[in-house]
Amino acid sequence: MLSQYQFIRLPRVFVRLPQVKELTCLSKSSIYRLMDEGNFPKQVSLGARSVAWVKSDVEDWCAQKINAAHI
């Protein structure tokens, strides 16, 4: 059974940094610091100078934070 804060799996979609910031309410520096610490999904290289995140990975991270706050 899905909890109130779990997401239904959708097709893999990439999101860029502005969307990641909007989804998480985190700053750019916080996102990169959490990534360096291993506490945030890693970005995916799309090309020589282009990166993105898998949207469902970011949404799962958000859901984990919400669930942890309600324990």
Image (cartoon, rainbow, N blue to C red):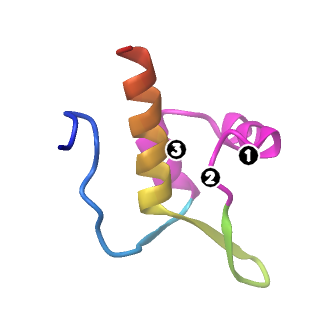
- Is 31 inside the magenta-drawn segment? yes
- Provide residue 67's location: percent of width, then percent of height: 38, 26
Task: Determine which residue is flagged by label 1.
Answer: 35
- Confirm whether residue 44 shows in the render: yes
**Of callouts 1 and 2, the N-terminal one:** 1
Residue at screen point 54% across, 63% down: 16
- SS at badge 1: helix
Q: Which labelled disc corresponds to residue 21? A: 3
- Check contact, mark 1 vs mark 2: CB within 8 A: yes
Q: Answer above or below: position of 51 versus 7.
A: below
- Provide residue 34's location: percent of width, then percent of height: 72, 37
Residue at screen point 46% across, 54% down: 19
Q: Which labelled disc corresponds to residue 41? A: 2
Foreground of the two, 50 or 33: 33
The part of the image, by quadrant, that contains residue 69 is: top left
Magenta: predominant secondary structure element? helix
Foreground of the two, 38 or 32: 38
Q: CA distance from mark 1 to mark 2?
A: 6 Å
- SS at badge 3: helix
- Provide residue 65's location: percent of width, then percent of height: 47, 29
Q: CA distance from mark 1 to mark 3?
A: 13 Å
- Confirm whether residue 22 shows in the render: no
**Which residue range is magenta in the image?**
17-42
Residue type (three-letter) at the residue carrying disc 2: Pro
**Of callouts 1 and 3, the N-terminal one:** 3
Residue at screen point 38% across, 14% down: 71
